[in-house]
Amino acid sequence: MAEHYPALQVVVPLLAAPLCLFVRNGRAAWGLAVLASWSALGISLVLLSQVTSSGVISYALGGWAPPIGIEYRVDVVNAWVLVIVSTIGALVAPYALTSVEREIGARRIPLFYTAYLLCLSGLLGITITGDVFNVFVFLEISSLSAYALIALGQDRRALTSAFRYLVAGSVGATFIVIGIGLLYSMTGSLNMADLAQLLPGVWESRTVKVAYGFLAVGFCLKLALFPLHLWLPNAYTYAPSPVTAFMASTATKVAVYMLLRFFLTVFGAAFSFDVMALDRVLLPLALVAVVSMSLVAIFQVNVKRLLAYSSVAQIGYMILGLSFATVTGLTATLLHLFNHALMKGALFMAMGCVMYRIGSVHIDAMAGLGRRMPATMAAFVAGGLSLVGVPLTVGFVSKWYLILGALERGWWPVAVLVLLASLMALVYIWRVVEVAYFREFTGDERTREAPWTLLWPTWALVVLNLYFGIDAGRTAGIARQAAEVLMTGIGQ
Amino acid sequence: MTLDLLLTHYNYWVVIFLMMVGFYILISRGNLIKKIVGLNVFQTSVFMLYISLGKVTEGTPPILVDGYGDADVVYSNPLPHVLILTAIVVGIATTSVGLALAVRIKEAYGTLEEDEITGIEAGIEPAGEAAG
């Protein structure tokens, strides 16, 4: 059994998805979703501990040996991302029960869990696979279910934002598949480890460079790097609350992982940084994303949209870490993948609680809510502090490594910009805090605290935010180990 | 660039042409159905790219036949065909999700023209929220 964990990681949620459709009962489908997502979390934790203690796991799917067969290859990098995705998956699933009953029609609830589990298994599949075409297949499984999930939003604008996401996402995925095809035409292989060994022989070929370009644009569309982020704010604003919490914490993170995996493991760090100058392309885009999107977030009145723009800025931080082209920078990127998932998950879940009680996340509707829903707003404040990067929260740990990476390269203006953007985060979080705590409550007198079924997953993420902010040694250790694996590559 | 290169690689020129046509439709057309058509043309060009990659000069179809199976027969690479079969299925799924969304959008907005939808959305958005 244990040797099949890599396959089960994907297969369990993938098989639970159609079962949800057959049970045709919202509660039963929910039970299945919780069961599947918690088993996925259990498996990913076992895989992470196995990988950190005894090295890379290679699993030949169906017994066909790589490089011909499809290989699931787990090293510390993707074991880490698997844990991120499945942690969020396991916490959003129980959260969804109450939230979905309020926000989605009863008839559609089993469909919601089907799409949710498909999206989860797609994201886990992208992360675990060692086969580049398999990446594309899982990417489409997760994307198509994501479009359906977003379209379930109450507001009719959810439909148009899902459509725009579909167009942008399909163009991105098609670019990725072009890149993969060109790589195959040069090497005749689809296995990542095999490609890593074959590609240095054909580095000089223009086909490989063109493939690199197609892949870069495709990934940047998927991970919503400025200026290819236009699909993101509306999609996050109008999707149902649990969907926003799940997507914001996982989908873009997995896209960042894809970029790291392709450009550092498959192509190799030397090719990416020395030949293609990836760092010099990404650095300005990341900086513009961090500063401009933080600025845009300040002027939003819909708090979900505010957080969505903040997400684009935070993605900028992750790409910034990569553009330092050092182990410290990459450590910051990998840490922030985890930390941002925790903080944005908590913030969007808190907004889901607000949505559940007052039916709006407009900033004016939240006046005085701090006294009516103290636990919800306290979770928002804690998540917000983490977003700003206050010490004792995970946000501080990522910012610390990011600034360390910038100073290591001697780029102090970059460090200054990171601090400046943190101040902007303080401004937009403070706007919400001010309205919620320092204004009179004007809404319905019967407004009460959100139900505990919504509160406990929210607070679970808040507690993780604080725990890993104080005890950062373990996460930083794994992130550094993963960064070293990425920088050295597997081809040598 | 010689004429020879143009003629012997004409399939790749077709691929590039279709890719650009599809992408242009996708960007320039405001009608959501036309956008999906553009996306389809764009994806189809990639199918042709993969199929072109699988062709081996002088190669036969990759089928085992008596008397051929063990001999040194040159055959076309079947793998890209299999890969693109998957991508075709994905393309169909994308198209159906896109069309289903278009139906729902038509029901909710009464139009499929992007500029009209944007206008309706701007109308229901309070000032300040319209940005982005």
Image (tube, coloured by chain):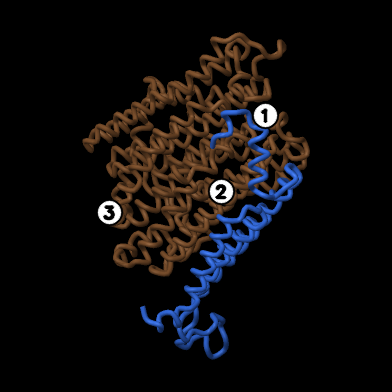
Q: Quadrant of residue A26?
A: top right
Which residue is label 2 attached to? Answer: A122
- How far from the left and from the top, in percent, is residue A18? 69, 48
Mark 1 or mark 3, earlier in chain: 1
Position of A167 relative to A337 (above/below): below
Q: Which residue is mark 1?
A: A99
- Front residue of A174/A292: it is A292
Q: Are marks 3 and 2 on the same chain?
A: yes
What is the crowding at mark 2: few (fewer than 14 residues within 10 Å), some, or many (at least 20)? many
- Residue at 65% from the left image edge and 19% from the top image edge: A450
Labels 1 and 3 within one chain: yes
Of labels 1 and 2, earlier in sequence is 1
**Distance between the alpha carbons at the discs numbered 1 and 3:** 47 Å
Crowding at mark 3 (Cα within 10 Å: few <14, some 14-19, many 20+): some
**Chain A in the picture: what colour?**
brown
Residue B131 visible in rendering: yes
Give the Cα separation between the discs numbered 1 and 2: 23 Å
Asked if marks 1 and 2 touch (Cβ < 8 Å), the reply is no
Nearer to the camera, A396 or A275: A275
Question: Which quadrant would residue A234 be assigned to in this image?
Answer: top right
Identify the chain of the residue marked 1, using the numbered disc in the image.
Answer: A
Q: Quadrant of the C terminus of chain B?
A: top right
Disc 1 secondary structure class: helix
Residue A162 lies in quadrant: top right
The residue pinned by badge 3 equals A270
Q: Residue furthest bottom?
A: B67
**Where does the image place residue A426, in percent across and percent down from the top left?**
43, 21
